[in-house]
Image (spheres, helix red, strand yellow):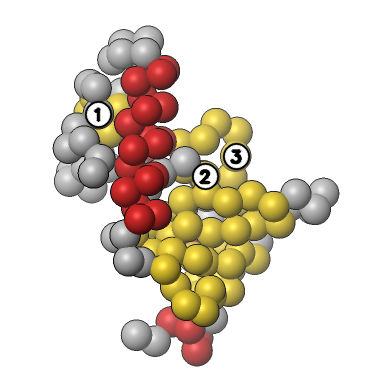
Amino acid sequence: MAPDKPPAGNVGAQGTTPVPGPAREHGSRSQISDFCASVNREARDANNELSPALEGRVSGKGRLRFHSAPNTGCRVRNSFIVPGDVVIARRRHGEWLLIDYVSRDGVMHSAWVDAARIALKESAARP
């Protein structure tokens, strides 16, 4: 089970999830990496797989940042998708989706993103 709190940090954007602060101020990058790995492991072990996986499209404005775990403190630097990009959603964990995305150069990326920014196909959006 993931720790309730990262090694040190701030309150998450929605005020419910503790997130690590900048590594230079709140512990080592290794501690933050361990925290994100633990959160990711817990989310992937949960019974939250979307079956079948669902196609979606990035909505809203601006970049949708990739995260290594469903936590705002686990952002992957310089990795994002933009409105209009097509993704496959494989898991839902709270307000997060684990998606697969194939970049223009053919590389498959898997990351957690804010579920509110993914418009799932109409037939897939029903409970």
Check whether the beta carbons of the residues at disc 2 and disc 3 lie within 8 A of each other: yes
Residue linked to disc 2: 66
- Distance of label 2 from label 1 (alpha carbons): 19 Å
For numbered disc 2, what is the local secondary structure? Answer: strand
Picture coordinates of residue 25, whole percent (x, y): 31, 11
Q: Which disc is residue 6 wearing?
A: 1
In the image, residue 117 above or below residue 63: below
In the image, residue 27 above or below residue 95: above
Picture coordinates of residue 83, whole percent (x, y): 60, 59
Q: Which of the two discs, 2 and 3, labels the residue nearer the N terminus?
A: 2
- Distance of label 3 from label 1 (alpha carbons): 22 Å
Q: Is residue 5 left or right of residue 82?
A: left
Picture coordinates of residue 44, whole percent (x, y): 39, 54
Q: Which of the two discs, 2 and 1, labels the residue nearer the N terminus?
A: 1
Does residue 115 appear in this view?
no
Residue drawn at x 65%, y 61% is 85
